[in-house]
Amino acid sequence: MNHKVVYFLAAMVMALVFIGASAKAAVEIGKPVPNFEAVDIKGDTFRLDDQKGKIIVLEWSNHECPFVGKHYNSGNMQKTQKAALDAGAEWVTIVSSAPGHQGHLSPEESAKVLEENGSTPSAKIMDESGAIGRLFGARTTPHMFVIDEKGVLAYAGAIDSNSSPNPATIEGAENYVLAALEEVKAGKPVTRAQTEPYGCAVKYGK
């Protein structure tokens, strides 16, 4: 069975597993996040429950979205990612664009995007069915989530405090993800645990 067939079957299974749960977000600040299992673009299985004991950053992405471009073309997302990885966290990039919608890619195309923008996530998942995105209530690209070592949601919202698509506004903006990581790492409650995400709407299918 070739890689594309395995990837397609995994996506179909994911759609069935999350049917019913996808109608509402199951994540709340201060509460355990739901488990999900998916095959990443390398063909490896990623299971959220297996990451207990690590801080996890979930990043919803769409490489064609100008707000995503703001943070990748400037290097800000890569800088944030590196800081998270250097702190011992896992970084999972998730694309919930449905087939035929903006941002949808094959695993091979998605790997090329990573190579071109210099991003090195722990895993990148093409959530074609939108099941994971709906489970977490992901609304925009980017939409960021930080999960602590116990599997509890510590932060959800925007990457930073300036919602303009202009990269020049990154300087001087508060990076909410880095702030959350620092406090989680120190064993403190996140001061600003929830913010309004900004960006392009996630391109879910029907």
Image (cartoon, grey):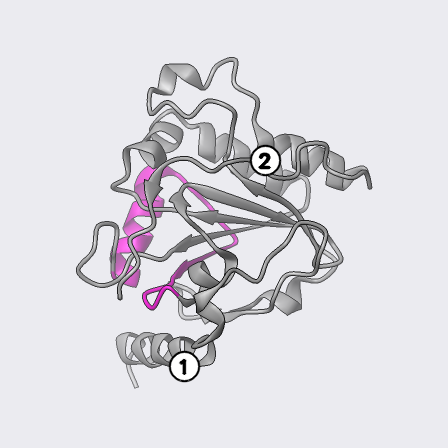
Alpha-carbon distance for marks 1 and 2? 32 Å
Q: Position of residue 89 (x, y in %)?
A: 64, 47
Give the extent of the magenta segment: 106-130
- Quadrant of the snapshot with the N terminus: bottom left
Residue at 81% across, 38% down: 188
Residue at 42% across, 16% down: 169
Return the disc, 1 or 2, that comes first in the chain's sequence.
1
Let me know if residue 193 appears in the view. Answer: yes
Residue at 37% across, 22% down: 164
Residue at 28% across, 33% down: 66
Residue highlighted by disc 2: 177
Position of residue 44 relative to residue 159, above or below, is: below
The quadrant holding residue 64 is: top left
Q: Position of residue 58 (x, y in %)?
A: 53, 50
Residue highlighted by disc 1: 16
**Residue 117 belongs to magenta span:** yes
Q: In terms of depth relative to the viewer, which is nearer, 78 or 32?
A: 32
Position of residue 45 relative to residue 102, above or below, is: below
- Quadrant of the snapshot with the C terminus: bottom left
**Residue 53 belongs to magenta span:** no
